Amino acid sequence: METVNIPKKVFRKILDDVQILIDDVEIALDAKVQERIETIESEKEKGKTEKDYYEYLAKRGIKVGVQS
């Protein structure tokens, strides 16, 4: 395998760019998680029954051993 030498200045720029991307992903995910928490807390989505869950899985081709 060949060794690649990257100048310190270029490597620092790469690391800075990667850190910016990581921060952007963190912000985007945090916003989505916060939105989901608010949805759950406001009870916009009611819980489903076990039967509804089994039907959901069956529609997607997942076999469930016990159904009521």
Image (tube, rainbow, N blue to C red):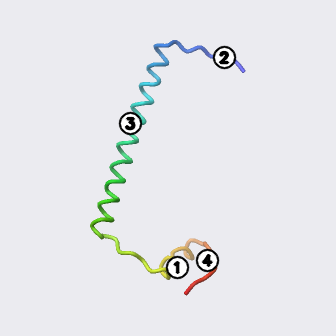
The tag on residue 3 is 2
Instruction: Name the residue at 41% across, 34% down.
Output: 21
Pointer 1 residue: 55
Could you tell me the amino acid type at mark 3? Asp
Q: Residue 66's x, y, as percent? A: 61, 82
Pointer 4 residue: 64
Helix, strand or loop under label 2: loop
Within the image, what quadrant is residue 28 found in?
top left
Instruction: Name the residue at 62% across, 16% down.
Output: 4
Does the residue at mark 2 contact the one at mark 3 (Cβ under 8 Å)?
A: no
Mark 2 neighbour density, 10 Å: few (under 14) some (14–19) many (20 or more) = few
Pointer 3 residue: 23
The CA distance from mark 3 to mark 4 is 41 Å
Q: Residue 62's x, y, as percent? A: 61, 72
Within the image, what quadrant is residue 3 found in?
top right
Mark 3 neighbour density, 10 Å: few (under 14) some (14–19) many (20 or more) = few
Horizontal side of residue 43 vs 23, given as left or right: left
Mark 4 neighbour density, 10 Å: few (under 14) some (14–19) many (20 or more) = few
